[in-house]
């Protein structure tokens, strides 16, 4: 057992282990781990673990000279957490004592409590500040450098280290936050999301500014029958419903669709919700389809810094193949002359431009509607021959955006 003061740090170390050693994402494990905590403890634990992952590469560089041999994974995570917290402004004495307490509380690490104490007392905040911006793990950085080049990847890493503000999509008037050029509102300093003005009234929902663009590209006519495939968490479903479309939302996850239902009700919007595998879903052809395909989510690292540490790229090819099948299935559910907006929250060319090129080869009559990508606030330089490529370093002075790829297909009439 550890003291109440050390409990959030101990949970953060536990979570780091589940990600790095267990290969699980924080979004999968945090709800279960933190559900019994008071809101303040929950928020603190989440902040600690996210900051640890954002600064991990820099922490490892700072720790290197003090470690003659690599300690056990848990001890290394205790050290990483302590380094990041101290160098982020935490009171060094309290951080060191808590980290030593965490090491002593576990039979597997108690013998290395002295190491934790000795190393963390030597942490130099000035050396931390002089280190380079944390780099992505090599397995992912290598792929992105091949796609974008070292300079652009370095700019993305700056955005990742900075983290992400809170973006919301307004349904009506939203009085708080910075108005972004694309119509979203952005908050940099905020507390509990549900306590913000207009939440209970359903005046807005949380959605990154980049994630709000695919529905705007689709821009369905009022009353149009629109299919939202792989719909959860539901931000695009709500956008389409707010535009006046007759929306059918399909997702394989019953629990995630439950949250979509709750958010629709809160915002006073309606859509038909169907829990189904998108590849098996059958219905009369729709006027338009939005497919936000399952992907590597590499575009969301600024808000999910654990992702590159939970994955190693081994399962990526199966995702690429699934995306191909989903595009074909979506086209099969589309009326002749209808439009399919395809998007992924990914930085990988394989999940964007390459998918478009392959789809055009499989469906030679398919057309691209690149004109639909010319939205207010979208820089023309972001649009390439295959579609709209968004990166976390875009809008750097405003706090960035999620990485996304978006394109619009038109089915032959």
Image (cartoon, helix red, strand yellow):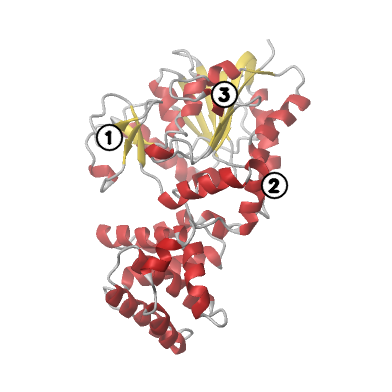
Which image quadrant: the C terminus? Answer: top right
Against 366, residue 320 (above or below) is below
In the image, is 155 to the left or to the right of 334? Answer: left
Whether label 3 touches label 1, CB < 8 Å: no
Q: Is residue 126 above or below residue 214?
A: below
Residue appearing at x 61%, y 35% in the figure? 278
The quarter of the picture where residue 39 lies is: bottom left
Estimate the x, y position of residue 310 in percent, counting from the top left.
Answer: 56, 59
List the residue tagged with mark 1: 177
| Mark 2–mark 1 distance (CA, rounded to whole Å) | 40 Å
The answer to which of marks 2 and 1 sits earlier in the sequence is 1
Q: Residues within 10 Å of mark 1 (few under 14, many from 20)?
A: some
Q: Secondary structure at mark 3?
A: strand
Name the residue carrying label 2. 318
**What numbered label is drawn on residue 165?**
none
Q: Is residue 297 visible?
A: no
On the image, numbered disc 3 is attached to which residue? 289
Please tell me whether mark 3 or mark 1 is closer to you in this view. Answer: 1
């Amino acid at each position: 057992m550890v003291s109440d003061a050390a409990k959030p740090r101990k949970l953060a170390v536990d979570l780091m282990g589940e990600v790095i050693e267990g290969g699980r994402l924080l979004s999968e494990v945090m709800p279960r781990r933190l559900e019994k905590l008071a809101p303040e403890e929950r928020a603190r634990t989440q902040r600690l673990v996210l900051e640890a992952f954002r600064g991990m590469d820099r922490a490892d560089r700072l720790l290197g000279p003090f470690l003659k041999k690599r300690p056990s994974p848990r001890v290394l995570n205790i050290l990483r957490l302590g380094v990041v917290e101290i160098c982020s402004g935490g009171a060094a004495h309290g951080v060191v004592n808590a980290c030593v307490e965490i090491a002593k509380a576990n039979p597997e690490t108690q013998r290395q409590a002295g190491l934790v104490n000795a190393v963390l007392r030597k942490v130099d905040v000035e050396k931390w500040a002089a280190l380079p911006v944390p780099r992505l793990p090599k397995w992912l950085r290598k792929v992105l450098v091949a796609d974008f080049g070292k300079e652009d990847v370095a700019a993305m890493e700056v955005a990742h280290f900075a983290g992400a503000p809170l973006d919301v999509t307004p349904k009506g008037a939203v009085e708080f936050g910075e108005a972004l050029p694309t119509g979203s509102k952005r908050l940099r300093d905020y507390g509990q999301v549900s306590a913000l003005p207009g939440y209970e009234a359903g005046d807005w929902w949380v959605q990154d500014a980049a994630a709000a663009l695919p529905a705007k590209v689709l821009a369905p006519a009022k009353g149009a029958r629109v299919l939202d495939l792989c719909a959860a968490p539901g931000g695009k479903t709500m956008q389409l419903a707010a535009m006046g479309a007759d929306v059918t939302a399909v997702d394989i996850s019953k629990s995630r669709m439950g949250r979509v239902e709750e958010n629709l009700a809160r915002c006073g919007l309606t859509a038909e919700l169907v829990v189904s595998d998108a590849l098996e879903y059958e219905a009369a052809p729709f006027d338009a389809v939005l497919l936000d395909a399952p992907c590597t989510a590499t575009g969301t690292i600024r808000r999910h810094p654990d992702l590159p540490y939970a994955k190693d790229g081994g399962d990526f090819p199966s995702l690429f193949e699934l995306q191909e099948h989903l595009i074909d299935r979506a086209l099969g559910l589309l009326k002749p002359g209808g439009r399919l907006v395809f998007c992924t929250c990914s930085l990988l060319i394989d999940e964007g431009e390459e998918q478009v090129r392959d789809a055009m080869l499989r469906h030679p009559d398919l057309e691209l509607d690149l004109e639909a990508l010319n939205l207010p606030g979208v820089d023309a330089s972001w649009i390439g021959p295959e579609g709209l490529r968004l990166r976390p370093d875009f809008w750097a002075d405003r706090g960035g955006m999620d990485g996304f790829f978006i394109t619009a297909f038109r089915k032959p009439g």
